[in-house]
């Protein structure tokens, strides 16, 4: 099979599509014939070596690439309750694997896989797992209750957009921050209020500060200044966390694959609560072009590699 890997961590143009044996599932695992796999900022960070530089993972000879996947189960290991032929979505949540979802086949633990949303094409389905799970787990960490205020930075992006939609489902008052050109988008996602990236307007909406923050844009202390004393801050990035000032609880969010939460998200997609956004598709052999486009910024929706 073909698989995209990073051996020289010199950016997207150094990525390689290699030929490698089709992997076999062990007990508790499934093999997925990949239809589509989204490209995310963490993939670009792997290609440039930033994940090694920041100490998030150890150096190795080969990094597999890709976290999200949508496809069809074509083989299962012992003890798996999923059936070959089932369309699924899944998440490869380990950085250091030599092969991941940007490939023609991928093996995942069965607990990292759930049946795909009914009626949704697999290209769109491939954009759900990483970003929506990150947003869901961030909101659960904040422990907010209906009526409280939530600030989401990077609200036009993948994680931020899902945090807005999930926040509204929890009956929170959602303040969304993004570029001014994205105000219409984040309001369509359900935001109650829009503020620009400088965040100075937050205190006109919530004078004492917001109850919780999902910092999808990784603004750090600049965003935390908008949180009330003894509030909550979900830091959506691996690596050093901002300080816990003014009694604020800082929760570092590094996404974890979880079937029950994936199933929860699938139900919300089927119910129309969560949206999917595909910006463009690329065949696997054109992956460097997709990576370079994402690295330049400004993409709204996901770039997806398709087989």
Image (cartoon, rainbow, N blue to C red):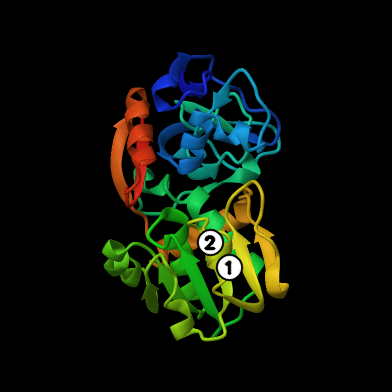
**Residue 216: percent from the left, percent from the top?**
50, 58
Q: Residues within 10 Å of mark 1 (few under 14, many from 20)?
A: many
Q: Secondary structure at mark 1?
A: helix
* Nearer to me, 156 or 199: 199
Q: Which residue is mark 1?
A: 224
**Is any part of residue 81 visible from this angle?**
no
Label of residue 6 in the image: none
Where 203 sits versus 108, above or below?
Answer: below
**Residue 162: percent from the left, percent from the top?**
45, 61
**Is any part of residue 8 visible from this angle?**
yes
* Nearer to me, 31 or 53: 53
**Residue 40: percent from the left, percent from the top?**
45, 42
Q: Residue shown at 44%/18% (left/top)?
A: 16
Image-based side of 85 in relation to 276, left or right: right
- Say if mark 1 contacts mark 2, CB within 8 Å: yes
Rounded to the nearest angstrom, the CA distance separating label 1 from label 2 is: 8 Å
Q: Residues within 10 Å of mark 2 (few under 14, many from 20)?
A: many
Where 297 sits versus 19, above or below?
Answer: below
Q: Which residue is mark 2?
A: 215
**Residue 56: percent from the left, percent from the top?**
65, 38
Q: Quadrant of residue 11?
A: top left
Q: Secondary structure at mark 2?
A: strand
Image-based side of 132 in relation to 61, left or right: left
Quarter holding the C terminus is: top left
């Amino acid at each position: 099979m073909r698989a995209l890997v990073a051996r020289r961590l010199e950016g997207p143009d150094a990525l390689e599509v290699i030929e490698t044996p089709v992997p076999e599932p062990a007990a508790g695992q499934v093999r997925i014939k990949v239809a589509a796999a989204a490209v995310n900022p963490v993939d670009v960070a792997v290609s440039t070596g930033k994940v090694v530089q920041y100490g998030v993972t150890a150096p190795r000879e080969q990094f597999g690439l890709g976290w999200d996947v949508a496809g069809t189960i074509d083989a299962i290991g012992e003890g798996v309750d999923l059936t070959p032929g089932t369309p699924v979505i899944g998440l490869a949540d380990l950085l250091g694997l030599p092969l991941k979802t940007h490939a023609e086949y991928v093996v995942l633990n069965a607990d990292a896989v759930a049946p795909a949303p009914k009626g949704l094409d697999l290209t769109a389905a491939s954009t759900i797992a990483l970003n929506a799970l990150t947003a869901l787990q961030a909101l659960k960490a904040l422990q907010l209750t209906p009526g409280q205020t939530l600030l989401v930075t990077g609200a036009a992006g993948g994680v931020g957009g899902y945090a807005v939609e999930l926040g509204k489902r929890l009956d929170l008052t959602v303040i969304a921050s993004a570029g001014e050109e994205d105000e219409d988008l984040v309001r369509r996602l359900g935001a109650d209020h829009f503020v620009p990236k400088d965040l100075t307007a937050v205190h006109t909406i919530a004078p004492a500060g917001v109850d919780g923050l999902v910092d999808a844009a990784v603004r750090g202390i600049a965003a935390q200044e908008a949180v009330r004393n003894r509030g909550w801050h979900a830091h959506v990035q691996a690596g050093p966390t901002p300080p816990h000032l003014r009694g604020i609880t800082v929760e570092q969010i590094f996404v974890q694959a979880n079937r029950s939460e994936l199933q929860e998200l699938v139900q919300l997609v089927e119910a129309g609560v969560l949206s999917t956004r595909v910006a463009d598709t690329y065949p696997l052999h054109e992956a460097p072009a997709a990576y370079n486009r994402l690295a330049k910024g400004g993409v709204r929706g996901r770039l997806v590699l398709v087989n």
